[in-house]
Each structure stands twice: as structure tokens, then as C-alpha cells.
Image (spheres, grey):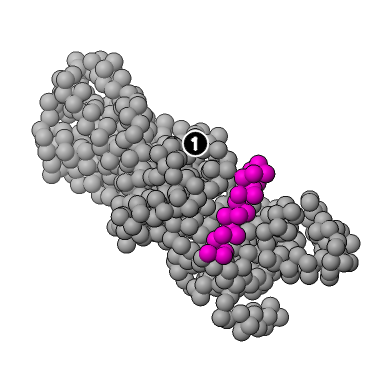
């Protein structure tokens, strides 16, 4: 039943997303601009680590896509709450967990599609990376999207107005981006900043994808990145489920 | 305990036909300013094929009552069964047999009428082919056939209301809850909606529980009125019985009757001001 319901909710929202190709393309615009206008600045710089500057930048941009995109997913729930759509679904026998999972899986699909577009553009710009590494990168994007979208939906159920939700998400996403070394590796940072960045879960994901892009599939970074990504997803889906089950006051 | 005894009595009396029975239903919200008792004690019985109007001033607790009966809100007191399903222990069963139309409706403006209806039917676990067949049938019954491929944003107020009701009927519910169904409709659409609700009762024996603060609507449509005021049931009876008991005579206006029932003279000191 959960499977049937999740597939139903997933289908409804995926059709909705694919219908607006405009939004789909504009979602990749920001990372694409970074790729185009920021990427070339790095090609001659000593970034530490092995591989080209593209192998450092593109993993960061992939996670930026998830961080900035998926965290805003909750806006749709705020809208649906106002329209009464969510409430109408909550009085049907459809599983309330499926109402969350269907949406979250749709988000993961959309962001992986956007990640594919981004990587294709990066290949044109000069990225060269092993195929398994690139695929591992997509898996991390999917996991990160599941985590952040769940978190975003849970927050949206609590906050309920776009006026409060926007600033809240910005307050989470900006420091997360700066402290996780998305743009430049934290190995360049002074010790205090490096230490601080280890408190931000996304740091581990970025390090893991960067290792994947240079073919190091069994490194310590990869292990810690995978553990953090799975742990984060488990935690946020649990929180999201609880909120979706009980919310309504 | 009095309400529990009353609950047992009403279960005994209406065991054959009662589709909704609620006793002592209550909901207290915890707010920063302290607890707010939105609903204090609501007893309600609706039989199959009966249209019951919940009537009351704004803030009386009508919507909160409906939200509890449709599993959207957990009661903080009391008990209810819907078509034999216990609200507290079998909310999934309650959802299977009830249809609910919220005051704001609940369709996505960007999605077509057809897609909303088919998805809704499948959320009620109808197989795909059956969901498509039911959509065609409902569109015919509710005069939506020509609109199936329009986005819901393009519908008029009356058409949108018919769609909202169609959405709530996809699974042929035994109970239909309507929260202020005619608010914002022109007189023609209102009359059309009344006919629709009567037809549901007559043809399918659906039990209908609707809230309204339009007295003419309550009078024209409801077989029985339950007047809710400050979270409790202030009166319960047919429109003529209420007129006789509270308005002074069978010819009293419902307005006078209503004011007599909810009149300020009987208000406890801590009650919220009423707005009619």
C-alpha cells in the first residue's frame, strides 16, 4: 500500500515538475553560471589535491544545486496548504508517509536530472572524470536532496507563511554553503575554519564526491561522506514523517 | 459522565441507522496565551439519508468539529464513530467512508479537472481503469463533462464548488462533510448546490453534515439543525421544533429563534463575544 501510494504521489508531482520545463532549466542556471564565469578562474590555481580544478569545482556545484534547490522545496507545501490541497489529501486513505516520500523522491529525480545537465556542461568546459565517480556523485546528490527536501517540507509545515520561510531557508543555506567548502576546498582554510567546517554535515559529502571524481572510491573521506549522507537522510525523513503524520493543528 | 451515558443511549436508539455518532467531543488548543477551548462538548448524531446543519456564529467551533470528525485534528476529549469506525482507533476506516469538502476547497489551480479527479479516485484506492470510469460518471452527474480538460484555475466559483464535491464523492462515501459549502456563490449556484446535496441524500442515502451561518440555507436544506455556540451544542432539532421551543411559535423567524438560542443573556462571563 505504501508503495502504491508513494508511486501515486510521486507520479502526480513529477508530472507537475516536468510540465514546467522553464523551472527545470532555471534550477540549473545558478550552478551553470558558476561553472561558466567562476570555473575558468580556478584552472591555474594550486587547489591542493590531485586532479584538475574542474574535479574540485564540479562536485561542489553539484551539492550547491541540492543545497539551494532542495531546501526551497517546502515552498510548494506552503502554497498547497493555502489552497487546501494537502488537507484534501490528508482526509483520503492515502498513507501520510507517502505524501512526504512521493514528494521527496520527485525532488531527488528532478535534481539528478539537473545534475546530469550540469555535468554535461562541465564536460564541455573541460571536466574529465571517471564514469563510476560521476555516478557516485549523482547518488550523493540524490541522498542530499532527500535529506534537505524532507527537512524543508517539515519546516514548511511548521512555519506556514512564505514571508517567514524564505529568510529561514536563507539563514540555513548561506552558512552551510560557505562552511562546507563548496566553492573552494577547505584544505586551503586556516585551522580554525577547517575545524569549524567539520561541524557542517555537507563538508563530508563534498569531500567524498571530490574523492569520487578523482577515482578514490575507498578512501576515508568516501566512508565518512557516505555515513553522514545516509545518517542525515534517515534523520530528516524521520523528522519529516513525524511532522506529516501529526500536523494539522 | 453524563455525556457518556447519553452517548450509550443514542447508540442504542440509532444503532440501526446512525452513521455519525459523537459524544462529548472536545478540542483544546494550547497557545502562548494559555489553553483555548475551541470545542468543549459536542454530541452529534446523523442518520443515513439525513442532512444535518451545524449552525453557529463565527468561532463557535463548527469547523473544528468537522476537522475532528474527518481525522484532521485529534480530539482532546470525547469519542465518535463514523459508519461504525471508531475515530480514535480506526482513523483509516473513517477516511475510507467519509468525504470532506473544506471551506477553501482543495484543488491545484495548475492541474486539469480530469487529472485531479482521477488522482483523487486512486488515492481512495480505486484501480486505474475504475478511476477513469468513475471520473466520467461523476463529471456527468455534476455537470463537469465539458470542463474535464480545463485547468481548475479556469473554473467559475460554482463550477469549482461542484468539482470540490465531486472530489469528495469519488469513493461513494457514506458520510459527506461540507464546511460552508455555499460561501461566495451566487444565488443560482447556491440553489444548484442545494439540489445536488438533496439528490445525494435521496438517491444514495448519503448522510450529510454541513456547517453554515446562512439561516436561509439551514432552513431550506437541513432536515435537522444543531446549533453550536461557544463550543457546546446549544440546541438540536428540526427547524420547526426549534422555532416552537425557542422562537415562541412555529411561525417565528429562524433569525429570532437563533438569537434566542445563542442570546447574550445566557452567556457565561468568560465567553467570547459572538458575531452573527
**Compared with residue B235, is residue B64 higher up or lower down, i.e. above or below?**
above
- Image position of A170 (left or right of B41): left
Dividing the picture into quadrants, the one containing residue B52 is: bottom right
Q: Out of A30 and A3, give the one closest to the viewer.
A: A3
Instruction: Identify the residue under disc 1.
Output: B153
- Which residues lie in the magenta part? B181-203
Nearest the viewer among A215 and B35 is B35
Report crowding for label 1: few under 14, some 14 to 19, many 20 or more residues within 10 A (C-alpha). Answer: some
Instruction: Measuring from the top left, give residue B220's x and y in whole percent.
Output: 70, 57
Q: Is residue B157 magenta?
A: no
Task: Determine whether B82 is above or below A121 in the image.
Answer: below
Query: Which residue is rendered at x = 44% and y = 53% of the image?
Result: B138
Measured as percent of width and height from the top left, residue B150 is found at 43, 37
User: Whole-percent x and y of residue B217?
Assistant: 70, 54
Say if residue A238 shows up in the picture.
Answer: no
Please state the horizontal and vertical placement of residue A190, each as a whole percent of the image: 32, 29
Q: Main secondary structure of the magenta part?
A: helix
Amino acid at each position: 500500500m505504501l508503495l502504491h501510494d508513494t508511486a501515486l504521489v510521486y507520479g502526480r508531482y513529477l508530472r507537475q515538475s516536468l510540465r514546467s520545463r522553464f523551472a527545470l532549466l532555471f534550477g540549473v542556471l545558478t550552478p551553470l553560471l558558476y561553472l561558466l564565469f567562476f570555473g575558468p578562474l580556478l584552472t591555474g590555481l594550486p587547489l591542493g589535491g590531485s586532479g584538475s580544478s574542474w574535479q574540485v569545482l564540479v562536485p561542489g556545484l553539484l551539492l550547491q544545486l541540492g543545497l539551494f534547490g532542495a531546501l526551497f522545496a517546502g515552498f510548494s507545501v506552503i502554497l498547497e496548504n493555502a489552497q487546501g490541497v494537502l488537507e484534501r489529501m490528508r482526509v483520503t486513505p492515502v498513507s501520510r508517509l507517502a505524501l512526504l516520500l512521493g514528494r521527496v523522491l520527485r525532488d531527488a529525480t528532478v535534481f539528478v536530472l539537473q545534475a546530469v545537465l550540469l555535468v554535461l556542461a562541465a564536460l564541455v568546459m573541460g571536466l574529465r572524470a571517471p564514469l563510476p565517480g560521476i555516478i557516485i556523485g549523482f547518488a550523493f546528490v540524490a541522498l542530499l536532496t532527500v535529506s534537505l527536501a524532507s527537512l524543508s517540507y517539515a519546516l514548511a509545515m511548521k512555519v506556514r507563511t512564505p514571508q517567514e520561510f524564505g529568510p529561514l531557508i536563507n539563514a540555513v543555506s548561506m552558512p552551510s554553503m560557505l562552511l562546507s567548502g563548496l566553492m573552494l576546498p577547505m584544505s586551503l582554510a586556516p585551522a580554525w575554519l577547517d575545524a569549524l567546517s567539520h561541524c557542517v554535515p555537507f563538508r563530508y559529502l563534498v569531500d567524498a564526491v571530490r574523492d569520487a571524481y578523482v577515482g578514490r572510491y575507498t578512501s576515508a573521506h568516501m566512508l565518512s561522506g557516505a555515513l553522514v549522507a545516509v545518517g542525515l537522510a534517515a534523520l530528516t525523513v524521520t523528522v519529516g514523517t513525524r511532522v506529516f503524520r501529526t500536523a494539522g493543528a | 459522565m453524563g455525556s457518556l451515558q447519553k452517548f450509550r443511549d443514542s447508540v442504542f436508539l440509532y444503532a440501526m441507522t446512525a452513521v455519525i455518532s459523537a459524544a462529548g467531543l472536545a478540542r483544546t488548543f494550547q497557545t502562548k496565551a494559555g489553553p483555548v477551548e475551541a470545542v468543549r462538548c459536542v454530541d452529534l448524531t446523523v442518520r443515513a439519508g439525513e442532512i444535518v446543519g451545524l449552525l453557529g456564529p463565527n468561532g463557535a467551533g463548527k469547523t473544528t468539529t468537522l476537522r475532528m470528525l474527518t481525522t484532521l485534528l485529534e480530539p482532546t476529549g470525547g469519542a465518535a464513530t463514523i459508519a461504525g469506525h471508531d475515530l480514535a482507533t480506526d482513523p483509516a476506516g473513517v477516511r475510507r467512508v467519509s468525504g470532506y469538502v473544506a471551506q477553501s476547497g482543495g484543488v491545484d489551480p495548475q492541474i486539469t479537472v480530469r487529472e485531479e479527479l482521477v488522482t483523487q479516485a486512486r488515492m481512495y484506492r480505486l484501480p486505474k481503469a475504475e478511476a477513469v470510469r468513475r471520473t466520467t460518471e461523476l463529471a456527468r452527474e455534476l455537470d463537469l463533462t465539458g470542463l474535464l480538460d480545463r485547468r481548475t484555475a479556469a473554473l467559475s466559483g460554482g463550477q469549482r464548488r461542484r468539482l470540490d464535491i465531486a472530489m469528495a464523492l469519488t469513493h461513494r462515501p457514506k458520510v459527506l462533510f461540507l464546511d460552508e459549502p455555499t460561501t461566495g456563490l451566487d444565488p443560482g449556484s447556491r440553489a444548484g448546490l442545494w439540489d445536488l446535496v438533496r439528490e445525494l441524500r435521496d438517491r444514495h442515502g448519503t448522510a450529510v453534515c454541513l456547517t453554515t451561518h446562512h439561516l436561509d440555507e439551514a432552513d431550506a436544506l437541513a432536515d435537522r439543525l444543531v446549533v453550536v455556540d461557544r463550543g457546546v451544542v446549544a440546541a438540536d432539532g428540526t427547524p420547526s421544533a426549534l422555532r416552537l421551543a425557542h422562537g415562541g411559535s412555529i411561525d417565528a423567524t429562524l433569525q429570532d429563534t437563533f438569537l434566542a438560542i445563542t442570546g447574550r443573556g445566557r452567556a457565561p462571563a468568560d465567553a467570547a463575544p459572538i458575531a452573527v
